[in-house]
Image (cartoon, rainbow, N blue to C red):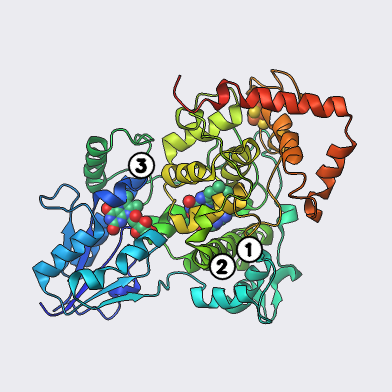
């Protein structure tokens, strides 16, 4: 062939992918390989495997329809080596290319593998920057280092403002539209009774997806999750339709109810675009531009549009920057010395804590939970109960259809459980049951009483919260953002403090924390 072998990974199903640019259809071959290693490096939720393999199969078809030669390896093809490196080596033997071109991957593990391909095959390997993101990693590194040679703490809010300036999104010259950078203060409403969020558009499985579903049920029967409700976009066209549905139906109220949680409402006014963006089916810029256009045309208010753009232009880019800046050491940090094993209820959904049960069951059925469920329900519980960061990270990487390490790890390890000691957030997002009660209706049908702090029926979050403050008193002594709860704790009656710590200890030793079934 003596053309180029262009390797495309499962989360790189993007028409404008760097590795596909300058493709010569007469000489080049695109390799897409379904491999066991990528399906099992964590025991992914069944919906995530279906989503990725189906997206790959659809993408291959779309390339072929444009006259591109695709070498597509199916999971059950005879001779499949089960690894990306193995499939690249086999493809080199088949096609004898002059070179290999690929795109910077989303996980450190895969980058390390890719860097070995040249030595393994004897063919030059070019790893191109992944320019599907709005922030270049080199730019982020320079920003993080700071102009004066070292910023003490990275802060998303400052990064976000730079990104607004750099992209011109929601800008009026040099100033932010509306006069403020951030309208979060307006975005904290609880779902009002009688307000029913519009049902999001679903994308029922076509023949290709159904074939992958059968494969996944047969090959990964023990993986977490169900497939019955699979309705994720698996093509760029579907992903664009999902975005359009969000912009028209849910964006106008996205801001108001961004932090709300409600029984039987897994999506509320959220966008459901992370799976598509992360798999490469939808561009982050297109999401931001569609939201901005809705505001300019009077179809959505500024607090909603700014909030949505901040999540993508700010948080999504920021966590990727932090991941590549801090890896590989980042994953091993355990600043709060947490060691407790993950409770079995995080797999079974069988717990008397209604908020956790809601989050886990919907995660099992949809491979989705929205941000506040991930952060303030399961994340907060993991933080307060001192769950082992490695197990918590693996759980989040396993159970969500949008989970790839570059985005999952900083959110879990940093934002939710503070295992990174404050790289991502200046204080831990620790909260008692009162927060969950304020933002949801979960407590109304819970076996525990959110108003009680001690005793067997007290909401576990309450005693755990104070126990967390007490346990880490010394660590956060100089953190001004933790001064208030620490003062309250110190001023508390010693008998009350003891009762709270006894309650927390009893709960932590009880059946809810059982790490095994039964
Ligand atoms: P919306 O709420 O509608 O937000 C719009 C978009 O903004 C999202 O699609 C997403 O691309 C982006 N976004 C919002 N918040 C974040 C954030 N903190 N980091 C990165 N992007 C963000 N997101 C993932 O894509 N993959 C993950 O594996 C993941 N793991 C998480 C783990 C924890 C503990 C927490 C607290 C958050 C995690 N997030 C993750 C971020 C966020 O929860 C999801 O992006 C969001 O819930 C996806 O649903 P949506 O598309 O409906 O988002
Ligand atoms: C997530 C995933 C899965 C389940 N399967 C494959 C696969 O069979 N082949 C492939 O190329 N990619 C797959 N992926 C996506 C990769 O895991 C992803 O590219 C890396 O985690 C880097 O983000
Ligand atoms: Fe969760 Fe506590 Fe409310 Fe129950 S009472 S739903 S455990 S916050």
Kindly report which numbered mark, 3 or 1, lies closer to the viewer in this rendering.
Answer: 3
**Could you tell me residue 300's position as x and y percent?**
62, 59
**Could you tell me residue 210's position as x and y percent?**
25, 42
Secondary structure under badge 2?
Answer: helix
Number of numbered discs visible in the structure rendering: 3
**Decide: marks 2, 1 in contact (CB < 8 A)?**
no
Q: Residues within 10 Å of mark 3 (few under 14, many from 20)?
A: some
Q: Residues within 10 Å of mark 2 (few under 14, many from 20)?
A: some
**Could you tell me residue 90's position as x and y percent?**
14, 63
Say which residue label 2 marks.
293
**Residue at position x 80%, y 50% in the image:** 477
**Could you tell me residue 408's position as x and y percent?**
49, 53
Q: Nearer the viewer, residue 513 or 278?
A: 513
Which of pointers 3 and 1 lies earlier in the amino acid sequence?
Answer: 3
**Residue at position x 49%, y 66% in the image:** 324
What label sits on residue 298 in the rendered view? 1
Q: Relative to 415, is 465 on the left or the right? A: right
**Residue at position x 81%, y 43% in the image:** 485
Q: Is mark 1 within 8 Å of ligand 1?
A: no
* For residue 275, above or below residue 211: below
Residue 217 seen in this snapshot: yes
């Amino acid at each position: 062939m003596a053309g180029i072998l262009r390797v495309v990974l499962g989360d790189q199903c993007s028409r404008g992918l760097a590795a596909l640019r300058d493709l010569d259809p007469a000489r080049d071959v695109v390799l897409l390989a379904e491999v066991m290693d990528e399906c099992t490096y964590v025991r992914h939720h069944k919906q995530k495997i279906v989503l990725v393999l189906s997206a790959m199969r659809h993408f291959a078809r779309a390339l072929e329809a444009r006259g591109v030669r695709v070498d597509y390896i199916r999971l059950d093809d005879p001779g499949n080596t089960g690894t990306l490196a193995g499939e690249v080596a086999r493809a080199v033997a088949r096609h004898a290319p002059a070179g290999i071109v690929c795109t910077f991957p989303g996980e450190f593990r895969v980058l390390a593998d890719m860097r070995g391909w040249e030595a393994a095959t004897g063919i030059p390997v070019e790893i191109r920057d992944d320019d599907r993101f709005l922030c270049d990693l080199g730019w982020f590194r320079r920003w993080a280092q700071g102009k004066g040679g070292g910023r003490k703490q990275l802060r998303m809010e400052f990064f976000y403002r730079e990104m607004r300036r750099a992209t011109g999104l929601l800008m009026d010259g040099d100033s932010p539209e509306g006069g403020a950078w951030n309208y979060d203060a307006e975005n904290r409403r609880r779902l009002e009774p009688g307000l029913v969020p519009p049902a999001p558009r679903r994308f029922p499985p076509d023949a290709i997806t159904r074939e992958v579903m059968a494969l996944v049920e047969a090959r990964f029967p023990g993986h977490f999750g169900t497939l019955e409700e699979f309705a994720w976009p698996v093509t760029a066209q579907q992903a664009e339709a999902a975005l359009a549905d969000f912009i028209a139906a849910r964006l106008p109220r996205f801001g108001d109810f961004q932090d709300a949680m409600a029984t039987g409402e897994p999506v509320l006014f959220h966008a459901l675009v992370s799976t598509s963006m992360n798999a490469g089916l939808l561009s982050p810029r297109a999401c931001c531009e569609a939201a901005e256009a809705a505001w300019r045309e009077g179809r959505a208010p500024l607090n909603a549009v700014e909030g949505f753009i901040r999540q993508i232009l700010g948080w999504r880019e920021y966590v990727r920057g932090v991941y590549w800046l801090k890896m590989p050491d980042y994953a091993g940090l355990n600043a709060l010395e947490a060691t407790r094993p993950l409770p079995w209820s995080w797999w079974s959904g069988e717990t008397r804590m209604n908020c956790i049960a809601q989050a886990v069951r919907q995660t099992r059925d949809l491979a989705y939970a929205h941000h506040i469920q991930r952060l303030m329900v399961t994340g907060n519980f993991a933080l307060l109960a001192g769950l082992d960061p490695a197990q918590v990270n693996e759980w989040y990487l396993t159970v969500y259809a949008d989970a790839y390490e570059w985005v999952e790890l900083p959110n879990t390890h940093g934002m939710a459980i503070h295992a990174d000691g404050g790289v991502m957030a200046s204080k831990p997002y620790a909260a008692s049951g009162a927060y969950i009660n304020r933002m949801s209706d979960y407590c109304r049908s819970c076996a525990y009483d959110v108003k009680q702090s001690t005793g067997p029926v007290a909401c576990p979050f309450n005693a755990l919260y104070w126990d967390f403050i007490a346990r880490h008193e010394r660590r956060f002594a100089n953190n001004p953002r933790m001064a208030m709860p620490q003062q309250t704790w110190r001023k508390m009656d010693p008998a009350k403090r003891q009762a709270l710590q006894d309650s927390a200890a009893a709960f932590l030793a009880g059946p809810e924390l059982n790490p095994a079934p039964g």
